[in-house]
Structures are given as C-alpha cells and as structure tokens.
Amino acid sequence: MPQDAPPNGSAPVTASVVTRVAEMQAKLHRWAAADAGRRFDDLFNFVHDPATLHVAFDRVAGNRGAHTPGVDGLTAADVEQIIGVPGFLDELRAQLKAGNFVILVHGDRADVQALHDDIAAVLEPMGLRLSPAKTRIVHMGEGLDFLGFHIHWRRKRGTSKWYVYTFIADRPIRSMKQKVRDLTRRTSQQPPRDVLIRVNQIMRGWANYFRHAVCKHTLDALENFVWHRVIRWWKHLHRWNWTDVRRHLTGPNGRWRRPTADGIELFNIASVPVTRYRYRGSKIPNPWLLPNHA
C-alpha cells in the first residue's frame, strides 16, 4: 500500500461518507495519471470498505432501475424495508472479502493439480497468488463449503441415483444464532420493539440468501430457536411464568399467536418458501455444440 494513503477506517469521524469516498477516488486518479504502470495493492480493500459500499448502494437506489429486482429478487426498497441496509452491506462485504472461487474438474487428482499450477502461473503476473490456507483439492463426495453453502455429492435417499446437493454450511448457522443471542440476552434492557425489528431484518436477509438450498428443516429449527430465545428474554424482562406466556400469546381459540411488541411481529423464518433452481441439464444453450460456432 502506498505510504501516503490512509488505512481504511482512519478517516475523521466528522467527515461524511461521500466526502471520504470522493477523496480516495481523487487520490487514486491522481496516482494513476502520474504513473500509468503503478500497481494499487490496496485497491481491493477500498472496494469492500464500508464507506464505499454505502455510497455504491445510495447510487444504485437513486438510479431509474432501482425499482427492478436484482438477481436475488430484491429491489433497493426491499433491502431498505425488509432486510435493512446495514445488515445487507455487512453480508455483501463478507462475501467480497472472502475472495473465493471454485473450479470443477472432470478428471482425477493429477488433472486437478496440473490445473492448479496453470492457475497459479496465470495469477502471478497480476501480483496475485492462491492462498495455501484457503486452497483445497477435494472430491465432491467429501463436500466443500463455498460462500456459506455446503455443496455435497450424495445419493438421493431411497434411490440409487446420485445428485449434487446444496446445504447451508455450519458457520452461517452459528453466526446467525450468535447474532440472535446477542440481541436477546436475559439482561438486555433494549425496547422489545427495536429488538424485534433488528431480529426480523437479520432473519429476512439470511433466509432470502439461503432459500435456494436444501434448508427446510434448518429453517424450522431456527424458527424454534429464535422463538424460545425471545420468549425466554421476555419472561425475564416482564417477570412472566409460562402461564403468563400462554395468556399473552394465545388467542380465544387457544392457538398460539406470534410474539408482537408495539405493532412489530416476530418474523417466522420457517415461512420462507424454499425454491430450488430448476434443473435444465443439456437444455442450457451452449454455442460450443453448434457447428461453426467460431
């Protein structure tokens, strides 16, 4: 990183986010104009800096296409009202910082090792390298974690057919549970309404990201976990016992109602529809199979 460039996060607290990003953009432009061959080793850090992401989201939300859903099916308004911009950008930043990619090879381990060496040779002139700590060569039968998903080739239950399944990895589940624990500690004195808003934002964003995985049982388990965390906290906060809980959370028909605080209802993460990607196989257009494709 150049010596005269400030480290990410060192900008004065009084400086606006927009001003901070504009100053860094101007500095990068000045350096590039002065030396066309200069390499910016810290450019990746600038891209996933929180200030940069906030400015980028503001610009996207202000575009005419902001009302059109993206590849995740969400518009800018959906992110603001359902997920929450801070949680959305935190998740996006984590994915950018991961810098991961997967290459699938039809061959044996020797073919994979040869491809590994070829990739390293391509990256070297660009000043990049494969991280030994993050680079793994595994068989799909062993499974691998990628961007929060666990991808595993296994036999379909009750049949002799084998398929590649996408599950939710253990780490995102532990992370989501820890966020809920932090918000619903028994000693917490935060207003229940504010806590429910934040918990709902976390669960909506998390479920929308993972809803294409094999996760119905996982969502059911998380719903049970979150419900009991909130109720346990409210019992301590309001000095309730289980009789009080039933009196407040059951209707005249005896059915349980969703926990609600000042008009904010606890989101049921198990209600998120799990939509698997449609299998198309050889129906996917492939110009390389056509004659004279060049």
Image (cartoon, rainbow, N blue to C red):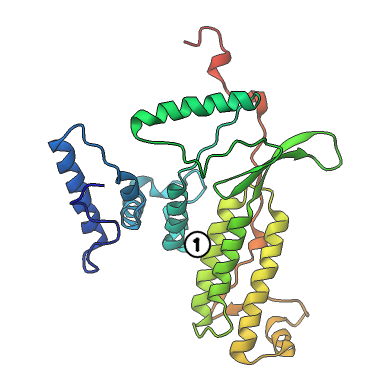
Number of residues whose C-alpha sits closer than 10 Å to that of mark 1, classed few (under 14), some (14–19) or many (20 or more): some
Residue 131 horizontal/vertical position (percent): 47, 41
Q: Where is 263 relative to 39, above or below? A: below
Residue that mark 1 sits on = 82
Q: Is residue 12 left or right of residue 156?
A: left
* Secondary-structure class at tag 1: helix
- Where residue 285 sits, quadrant-wise, is top right
49 or 235, nearer to the observer: 49
Quick one: which residue is furthest to the right in this view? 158
Quick one: which residue is furthest to the bottom in this view? 239
What residue is rendered at 60% in x and 36% in y?
137
Residue 274 horizontal/vertical position (percent): 66, 51
The kind of residue tagged 1 is Ile
Q: Where is 245 relative to 9, above or below? A: below
66 or 275, nearer to the observer: 275
Residue 11 horizontal/vertical position (percent): 24, 62
Q: Is residue 226 left or right of residue 119?
A: right
